[in-house]
């Protein structure tokens, strides 16, 4: 769950620390996110949010654009070999989104995973690639 304060998002612990500081300094909560951390729960956003202080994942709800953003980021990270990225390790499992390669990317992955001397499999992939070019 999260708090909004000064145009940033914070986890419960960090928001409570900020509130304690503000309370000590004599600030009052007047319900304004510019003045005092305001609880916003798991408010929907266009991307996964993390605490501005400690980087904890805030498990916010996502818009349709946000879900597409997570899918694209997971695909990019997986194809770049960054399988330990925050998108792959944290966002994907939380939002139920997993890697979905394009047909071209899937063929490239297969081609890269085959031993160089496995000619018969390379030939089969070439046939598939050419067949797919004909389809598009
Ligand atoms: Zn935090």
Image: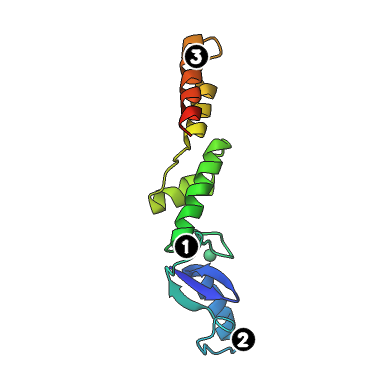
**Residue 73 against residue 40 in the figure, above or below:** above
Residue at point 55%, 59% (across, down):
55
Q: CA distance from mark 1 to mark 3?
A: 47 Å
Q: Earlier in the sequence, mark 1 or mark 3?
A: 1
Q: Ligand 1 near label 1 (Cβ, under 8 Å)?
A: no
The tag earlier along the polypeptide, 1 or 2, is: 2
Percent of width and height locating residue 97: 41, 48
Q: Would you identify the image quadrant in which residue 33 lies?
A: bottom right
Q: Visible in this render: residue 83?
A: no
Coloured how?
A: rainbow
- In the foreground, 131 or 17: 131
Q: What residue is pinned by disc 3?
A: 123
Mark 3, Cα crowd under 10 Å, few <14 / some 14-19 / many 20+, is few
Q: From the image, state whether disc 1 or disc 2 is nearer to you.
A: 1
Determine which residue is flagged by label 2. Answer: 25
Secondary structure beneath disc 1? loop
Instruction: Report the mark closest to the observer, 3 or 2.
Output: 3
The residue at the far left in this view is 96
Asked if the beta carbon under badge 3 is closer than 8 A to the nearest atom of ligand 1, the reply is no
Figure check: 112 above or below 70: above
Considering the numbered disc 3 on the image, is that residue within a helix, a strand or a loop? Answer: helix
The quadrant the N terminus occupies is bottom left
Position above or below: 8 against 93: below
Q: Which mark is residue 58?
A: 1
Decide if residue 61 is in sight here.
yes
């Amino acid at each position: 769950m999260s708090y909004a304060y000064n145009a940033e998002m914070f986890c419960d612990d960090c928001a409570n620390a900020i509130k304690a500081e503000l309370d000590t300094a004599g600030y009052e909560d007047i319900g304004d996110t510019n003045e005092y951390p305001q609880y916003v729960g798991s408010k929907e956003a266009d991307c996964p949010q993390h605490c501005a202080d400690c980087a904890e994942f805030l498990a916010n709800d996502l818009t349709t654009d946000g879900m597409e953003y997570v899918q694209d980021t997971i695909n990019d990270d997986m194809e770049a070999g960054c399988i330990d990225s925050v998108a792959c390790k944290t966002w994907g499992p939380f939002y139920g989104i997993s890697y979905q390669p394009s047909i071209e990317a899937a063929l490239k992955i297969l081609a890269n995973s085959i031993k160089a001397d496995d000619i018969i499999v390379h030939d089969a992939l070439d046939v598939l690639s050419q067949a797919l070019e004909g389809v598009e």
